[in-house]
Image (tube, grey):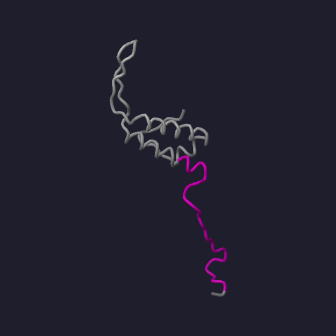
Amino acid sequence: MVYMSRSLNWQTICKLYTLEQIQEKVDFYMDQLERATLKLYDKDTTQGRQKVESAEIDKIESILAVWMKALECKSGNGGGTRAVSVNFRGNERGGF
C-alpha cells in the first residue's frame, strides 16, 4: 500500500497504481457514497443495539473525484488529443 498524504494527487495515483487497483478504489468509494445517504441511524438486533454514523458525503465525493480522475488518466480517456508542432528547420518559413 502506498502512503497517501493529506491531499490525494490523481497524477501520483495514476503513476503508482495499476488500472485494476484504481478501478477497485473507484468501485469502493462509489459504494461508500451510495451508503452514506444516511447520516446517523440506530440498528437494533437480537444481539444488541448499535449506533452507526456514516462518513460525510462531501469527503467521500472529494476522494472519489480524485480516484476517478486517476482512472481517466490510466485508461487514456482524459484530456483529449494533444497536438505538438515542431519546426525542424529552425527559423525558416519554408516558402511562406
Q: Is residue 43 left or right of residue 69?
A: left
Question: Residue 38, position in %: x, y?
Answer: 36, 33
Residue segment shown in magenta: 70-94
Q: Pinpoint residue 45: horizontal percent, then vertical percent.
A: 39, 16
Residue 87 sits in quarter: bottom right
Q: Residue furthest top?
A: 47
Q: Is residue 87 magenta?
A: yes
Name the quadrant of the C terminus. Answer: bottom right
Q: Name the one closer to the observer, 49 or 58.
A: 49
Residue drawn where x is 50% and y is 44% of the image: 67
User: What's the residue at 53%, 43% (across, down)?
Assistant: 13
Q: Which residue occupies the foreground of this view, 93 or 28? A: 28
Residue at (52, 45) in percent of width and height: 12
Residue 59 on image: x %, y %: 38, 40
* Number of numbered discs on residues: 0
Does 28 appear in magenta? no
Residue extending farthest to the bottom is 95
Percent from the top left, x then y, of residue 33?
43, 38
The answer to which of 91 and 66 lies nearer the viewer is 66
Question: Which quadrant holds the N terminus?
Answer: top right
Judged by its main secondary structure, the magenta piece is loop
- Residue drawn 59% across and 48% down? 74
